[in-house]
Image: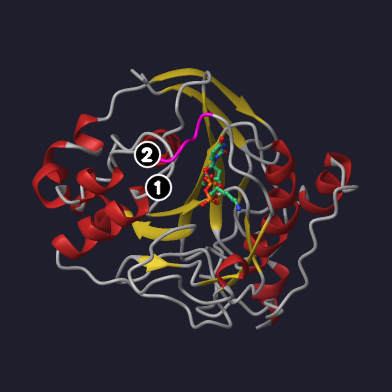
Amino acid sequence: SSSSIISISSSSPTVLPPCPADPPGLVGPMRVEFDWRRTMEDVRRGSSAGLRDGGRYSPPDCVSRHKVAIIIPFRNRHEHLKHWLYYLHPILKRQQLDYGVYVIHQHGTTTFNRAKLLNVGFVESLKEYAYDCFVFSDVDLVPMDDRNVYRCHSEPRHMAAAMDKFGFRLPYKTYFGGVVALTRAQYMLINGFSNTYWGWGAEDDDMYKRIVRRKMTVSRPDSKVGMYKMVRHTRDAHNEENPRASSQLSLTAVTMDNDGINTLKYTVKRIDKDQLHTMILVDIHAQL
Ligand code: UDH
């Protein structure tokens, strides 16, 4: 009716309707180019509209169905983060998510531990807001189709189903790397991720084994919607292949109840709120 239209103004309190189940503004396949000339000013110009401090957003005209914390493990990849922010913010807004971006920055130069940083992101983001869904994303992965919505499903979701570096298909059937989404309940059921994979490799396979062990299955978008482009890079310093990976992986079922969110220890060194993200610098108590 006309009266309900008139009642919608920025000054009067209004009850927003729920967002539609299918976001109406999605565009489908997108061109993704990692142009090194892109500056942070370009990124801010294209991305900051509607964002609140710390990289927080909620749709202005409806109540989102999804409260999503996006967790990015990070150290010394500012170039990649720039591209990620440039592409993802506009996509996440079109997807009508109530979201926040958390960059979990490992302090120091000790061996990198991706999965432990993801656990820290889970705990720290929940201190800020009652997120019900957690998307764990590498900093160098950008989706090529915005129908790949950064939300959770009834089973843990592997979102990066078709990465360019693997010829736009899964490298193996049980692959659970790159970008994944779990609800708070799914995450708690597997005791989060392992804290003990220092260096490169197998922490994502460990996550997969936890999920199967708890009798869940993995869902994925199809290989068109699940396409991702990765920023090309060489192996980082202080992230050598983990020599213990395969022996650790053979014991996941035995160790998972005593290695995860219930044994997580770390020290937050500082929290910086940029308009495009919340950066949490953390000492993850590396002993190596
Ligand atoms: N990461 C960092 N800093 C590091 C290491 C890892 O931020 O020093 C994060 C980042 O989000 C990255 C993710 O952890 O996307 C995964 O780490 P990775 O990029 O090393 O893993 P990936 O499988 O690459 O993408 C493996 C090494 C590439 C070697 C290529 C040789 N052809």
Task: Decide whether the magenta segment is chiefly helix, strand or loop.
Answer: loop
Q: Which residue is mark 2?
A: 242
Is 233 covered by the magenta stretch?
Answer: no
In this view, the residue farthest toward the right is 37
Q: Are marks 2 and 1 in contact (CB under 8 Å)?
A: yes
Q: Residues within 10 Å of mark 2 (few under 14, many from 20)?
A: some
Query: In the image shown, does 126 or 229 lie closer to the viewer?
Result: 229
In depth, the one of 141 and 235 nearer the eye is 235
Q: What residue span does the magenta drawing correspond to?
A: 238-242
- Check mark 1 vs ligand 1: CB closer than 8 Å? yes or no: yes
Can I make out residue 11 in this image?
A: no
* Secondary structure state at the residue bearing disc 1: loop
Task: Locate residue 38 relative to residue 105 in the image: left or right.
Answer: right
Q: Is 56 positioned to the left or the right of 205 in the image?
A: right
Q: Position of residue 129 (x, y in %)?
A: 44, 41
> Magenta stretch: residue 241 in it?
yes
Residue at left offset 27%, top offset 52% = 206
- Please say if 27 is above or below 273: below
The numbered dot on residue 201 is: 1
Q: Secondary structure at mark 2?
A: loop
Residue 256: which quarter of the image?
top left
The three-letter code of the residue at mark 2 reads Asn
State the separation of the CA atoms marked 2 and 1: 6 Å
Viewer-nearest residue: 254 or 2: 254
Mark 2 near ligand 1 (CB under 8 Å)? Answer: no
Image location (x, y in percent) of residue 42 = 88, 47
Estimate how packed mark 1 is, as few (under 14), some (14 to 19) or many (20 or more) residues with alpha carbons within 10 Å: many
- Extreme left residue here? 254
Outermost residue, front side = 243
| Residue at 45%, 35% in the rendered image | 128
